[in-house]
Each structure stands twice: as C-alpha cells, then as structure tokens.
Image (spheres, rainbow, N blue to C red):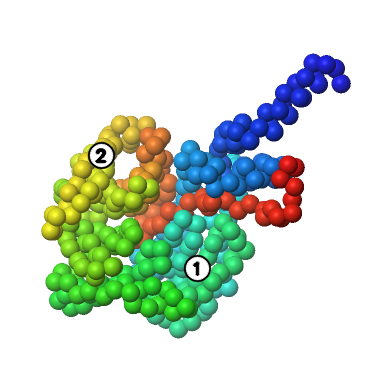
Amino acid sequence: MPPAAAESSSSVSLVLRSQDLLGEILLRVGFPTTLVRAALACKRWLRVASDPAFLRLFRARHPPRLLGFYATAYARLGPPEFWPVRHPPELASAVACAATILDALPGRVTDIVDCRHDRLHVCFSRSGGYSSNGDGDGELEVVLSPLQDPAGGRSHAPATPWRPWLCRAFETNYHSSSQTNLKVNVFQDGAWRTRTSITTGLPSSKLIRNVRLMGSKLYMATDDNVLLLDLESASFCIIELPEKSDFFHHCQLLKADDSRVYLVTVRREQLRFWQHRSVSGSVGNWLLVDTVYLDKIFSNLGTPVGFFKVACVGDNAEFVLLQSSSRFYYIDIRCGTIEEVVQRDSFSDIWPIMMIWPPSFPKLKEEYDRNK
C-alpha cells in the first residue's frame, strides 16, 4: 500500500476507534433505521449506538418521524384508512408496514380505538361487514405493533367499557343522563379494573374531544373548557380555556417532554399554542408560547385560508393536521412546511402513527470481548 494511502487508512481507523468521535458520526445518520444498519457493522459500533445516553442525544436531535395517520369513518360505516405523509426513502419500509397492517388480520377491521406511538388498538369482525353497533357478535379487540411485527402479530384484549382512550394503561368513559360519570380503568392481570370513578355536575351532552394523561392527572378537552381529573385524590376541576375558538372542535390538548400540558387553538388565521402552568380553583393559568400564521404557510400552496378545525396534533407541537371542508392539511411546525394529505368526507377520529422508538438492536452476548 502506498504511504499516503496507508496514512489515510490509519487516520480513518483512529477516528472510528474513538468512542466520542464515533458517537458524533452516528448522531448524524438521521434515521433510526440507518442507525440500526450502522450498528451491525461491528460489536463496538453496536455498543455505542445502543447506549441509553447516546439514544437520548439521538432522539433530541432526530425526534421520531411521523409516518401518517389512521382515520375511521363516521358511524363505522366504512373501513378505517391509512393516510401517509411525504417521507424520505429511508422510511418507505416503515410506511408500507403501517399501510398494510390493517389487512393482516383474519377478518375486517371495523374501528380503531386508539394509536400511541407505534401501537395500534383496533376492533375487527370475523364475520365481515361494517355496522354502527360496536357491540356486534364476533367482534374482537386487539393491540397491534405494525412496525415491530408487520405480519400482524397481536395481543388480544377484553372489550373496553364504553369509549376508551389508550392513555398509557388507562382508559376513560363518561355516561349518564343529567350528569357525567368519569371513570378510569387500568388493564391488570388480563382484565380491566376500575382505578378511579367520580360523578360530576356536567351535562352528559358535553363531548370530550381528546384526552392526555400526565403523571396521575387526566386532562380532557371539551368544546369550551378542559376537565382535569386527579387519579390519586379522585378530585375534579374545570379549567377555563384561554380564549374561545372560532367554533367547536377548534382546540386540542397535547403534551410535551417538559411534562406540561399544552393547548392548540384556531383563532381567525392563527394557530395559537398555550402552556398550562397551574390551576387555581376552576381557573386555568395559560401562557401563550407560540403563534403560527396560517396565511403565510398556505401561501406556499396557493390556497386561500378558510375555516379550519384541528383534526390532530402531535406531542411537543411538532405537527398539526388541519381539516377544511373535505381537505386535510399536514403542517410541520418545526420546518414551517405544509402538504395536502388527502381529500375525504365523513371521517371522525384521526390518530398519528410515529416511527418506532427506541429502535430494536441485536443483543450483545456478555462474553463478547469489549475491545472488539
């Protein structure tokens, strides 16, 4: 080998043998799929890539990517759908898994109960067909992992009481004639068990739009306020909204890595992001932390700004899905970009599915030489 080539090869080898420099290089790969492939190069690379401290840095620099949205039809009169968003080639395989998982069940998916990160809670009927009656014979509930088991591997779950939301291990329901009963169940030992139940003076007509669980507190957004249920003390209070949106369904709760709850509202031609700081009696203390001007974003599409409702919002306010009539628009808040995702009528509940995190690495055997 010529001296110059040997010197260059030696320099590269020194760089790749340095734990710190190798970590800096791996931080720049951009995608967890690429990180896993790089980790397969050798055992030392695998140790660096799978180190929890390194993964925290990687996630901070490259948050999990949005793959698309699952959507269910009103009254369950049609099949749920998957709506992909634009994605780089590195995520094509993951998007394909998310798109085909609904066809992997030995029956027909009738409803999507919830989706958290990369786990999907669905109802499916072995007899086929669609019905607005969710208690039909032959209907089962299962939890799928589209990105970890694209072949449709699943765990069965007992039917959830009334209408659930998968907030970690919790679900909520409400039902009464003149009052609202808030009930929280936890899935333990193969069955749903009541964790907290409280009756409020709220009318039963008050619809809960979305739910966020933060620690032991359950936040539930309605059209004109936020309901807060403390699971530890079984106490309940009402948090007033910081402002009234243009009309109903224009606000959604979201959570962030700082363990605080945020609210996004649509007001005229603005998306406004509010941080909830404390509760004093029934009054919420909100701080306006960001404003996104929709007219500027929509100018990139050449589409005039109309009336919107917030169909879906991502954790940490990373993205928002807006609905205007039958058009759905995905806005990447961090990049300030927008795309029209789909044109559909009569779709009610919408959930995002994110790229799996943390990535799955091969296991290192304890007897491996750490110098290799």
Farthest residue in the right direction?
1
Residue 199 vs 99, above or below: the answer is below
Q: Position of residue 158 (x, y in %)?
A: 45, 78
Three-letter residue code for mark 1: Val
Judge whether residue 65 can be spotted in this image: no
Q: Position of residue 243 (x, y in %)?
A: 16, 48
Marks 2 and 1 close (CB-CB < 8 Å): no
Q: Position of residue 308 (x, y in %)?
A: 27, 47
| Residue denoted by label 1 | 143
Mark 2: give few (<14), some (14-19) or many (20+) Cα within 10 Å: few
The residue drawn where x is 12% and y is 58% is 281
| Residue denoted by label 2 | 289
Mark 1: give few (<14), some (14-19) or many (20+) Cα within 10 Å: some
The residue drawn where x is 69% and y is 42% is 44
Three-letter residue code for mark 2: Val
Q: Name the residue nearer the viewer: 188 or 119.
A: 188
Q: Is residue 87 left or right of residue 211?
A: right
Q: Is residue 145 left or right of residue 361?
A: left
The residue drawn where x is 55% and y is 42% is 54
Q: CA distance from mark 2 to mark 1?
A: 36 Å
Q: Which of pointers 2 and 1 indicates the residue nearer the eye?
A: 2
